[in-house]
Image (cartoon, rainbow, N blue to C red):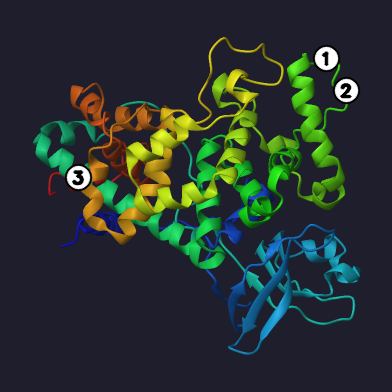
Amino acid sequence: MTAGSRYEQLRSRIVARESSGSVAEMPEHELQSLWFSGAFGREFKTTDGRSVRIVQFGIWNHEAGPDFAEAAVSVDGGPVERGHIELDPDARDWERHGHATNPAYDHVVLHVFFDRGEAEAFARTSGHRLIPQVRLSIAMVDDPPVPQPEAKPGRCVGPLRNLPESKVRDVLRDAALFRMRRKGAALLRIEEIHGADEMLFQALSGTLGYKSNKLPFTLLAQRLPLKLLRSVQGDAPALLFGVAGFLDQKDLAPFDSPTRVYLRGLWERWWPRRAEFERLTIPRPLWKMSGQRPMNHPQRRLAALAQLVAHWPRIRALRAACVSDAIADFCAELRDDYWDFHYTVTSKPAAKRMALIGETRVTEMLANVFFPLALAVSPERWDEFSRLPASLTNARVEIAALRLFGDSPLAGELLKRTAFQQGLLQVYEDFCQRDASDCQRCLFPEQLSNW
């Protein structure tokens, strides 16, 4: 039995794959981001039963019109058709939004949607050409959105307390191995679609966004591909801040002198490109500004992302080697003349330099990007990953520990290692978050005694 497969078998027996009938609570931008990352796959059936393969997912459309331009699809194994792809939460949006009479949508080769009414909805161009349609479901995604359970001890506390410590560690180790394999597979799927560099850029961008801003950071990396940012040289920071929507301040008078100089420099580079890129601007409600530690402000993380773009050949080499200390040293060396000493554009300068990417973010990058990729190629590197210390916990890890271990001192010991945190999160997401009975009908506690 391969490493991680025992947990996978247990999970497959008792975790039901729940389907979501509605996407009303998900922002359209999140659905678009999932689609573009290949989270739904690339082979589908149309609503009339034909097979569809996405040859190229295209690029985010800079102009008014469909969501994705320069895409390519093959229907029923036929010739590749090049054109646009439009994604709508509801099939009826095609008519509601006037796409059927808008010539900008005449080159759409595929209409993707999630919900529809009782009557069948068709997608036609202004020339009455019928467009193939594909219906998606959130159940097609490996990790559909699930609610956060209450922070209290669960029924697993007793069985885990009665297990020998070696078995507890074995359960979490197997869950962590399963989790890392899934992460690696998801990253390699994006690599297949968009290439190795774009995959790595999107993945690192997501980790810089933390949980609260992962979506806008991922959207930024998708809408401003690495290849584009590398080609514009010194304009990359301005494009990132502009498309993020952070350069809408016209009056710089309220800021101190260093901030005025910094913002004016970004604005002067953004202005000539504004008309080309402003359609891609991230909607302000997607950004979570409050509740963040000052050092984690999204604007500081954008500055860090710009530095990753500037040093990309080094990033590529760090991925290939995946040496924890080398990645940490590289992040510690990153510099930004302004953000090294500023929390936000409205804060007073700090007395001492602050790291653009701190230890906690480095650990997240190792656990979510570098090691999943390394383990996908070299599974024997697990021992190296298992020794990686955890810099800090977070709310989800702490709730998970409370649900499974209660006040057991073993939880504190296990949480000192990143690998055990990952295993704990996998169990928590698979069982605690999916269980609607508040532990009463969850089958995981009984399975522990048979591990």
User: Mark 2 = which residue?
Assistant: 251
Q: Residue at x 80, y 40 (%)?
A: 269
Residue type for callout 2: Asp
Q: Position of residue 366 (x, y in %)?
A: 38, 42
Residue 264 lies left or right of residue 353; in this view the side is right
Instruction: Examine the image and state in which quarter residue 268 appears.
Output: top right
Between the C-alphas of marks 3 and 1, the distance is: 56 Å
At mark 2, the secondary structure is: loop
Say above or below: 407 vs 397: above
Between residues 135 and 42, which one lies in front from this camera angle?
A: 42
Whether residue 436 is visible to the viewer of this picture, yes or no, is no
Q: Which mark is residue 254?
A: 1
User: Mark 3 = which residue?
Assistant: 171
Q: Residue at x 61, y 42 (%)?
A: 217
Say above or below: 232 vs 250: below
Q: Residue at x 76, y 37 (%)?
A: 245
Say above or below: 72 vs 258: below
The earlier-in-sequence mark between 3 and 1 is: 3
Residue type for callout 3: Val
